[in-house]
Image (tube, rainbow, N blue to C red):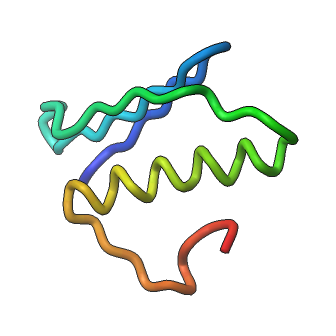
Amino acid sequence: MIRIGVDIGGTKMEVAALDESGGELLRRREAAPGGAYPDALRAIAQSVLDAERAVGVMHRAEETPFS
């Protein structure tokens, strides 16, 4: 099982993926999402999906949030 963590601050957002033992598989930092609340949620969801894809977690299209 892969765990995904998101840290959102005033200027940055960081996403990390951890393996079952807590080892870091991925860490990405980008600008914090701006705009209206729904836009920020979409940006967060997209960052999580990108992290999952980068470590090999795949989803069916109908399971993708905010599509």
Left or right relative to 26: residue 6: right
Residue 10 figure quarter: top right
Q: How many marks?
A: 0
Whether 54 is drawn above or below 31: the answer is below
Measured from the top left, where is residue 54 in percent x and y?
25, 56
Image quarter hosting the C terminus: bottom right
Left or right relative to 47: residue 25: left
Measured from the top left, where is residue 12 in percent x and y?
54, 20
Residue visible at 59% across and 44% down in the picture: 44
Residue visible at 17% across and 43% down in the picture: 19
Whether 50 is drawn above or below 19: the answer is below
Whether 43 is drawn above or below 64: the answer is above
Left or right relative to 32: residue 48: left
Residue visible at 33% across and 44% down in the picture: 3
Residue visible at 26% across and 51% down in the picture: 2
Image quarter hosting the N terminus: bottom left
Measured from the top left, where is residue 4 in percent x and y?
38, 42
Q: Among all residues in the image, which is located at the extreme top?
A: 10
Q: Among all residues in the image, which is located at the extreme right?
A: 36
Measured from the top left, where is residue 13 in percent x and y?
52, 26
Left or right relative to 17: residue 35: right
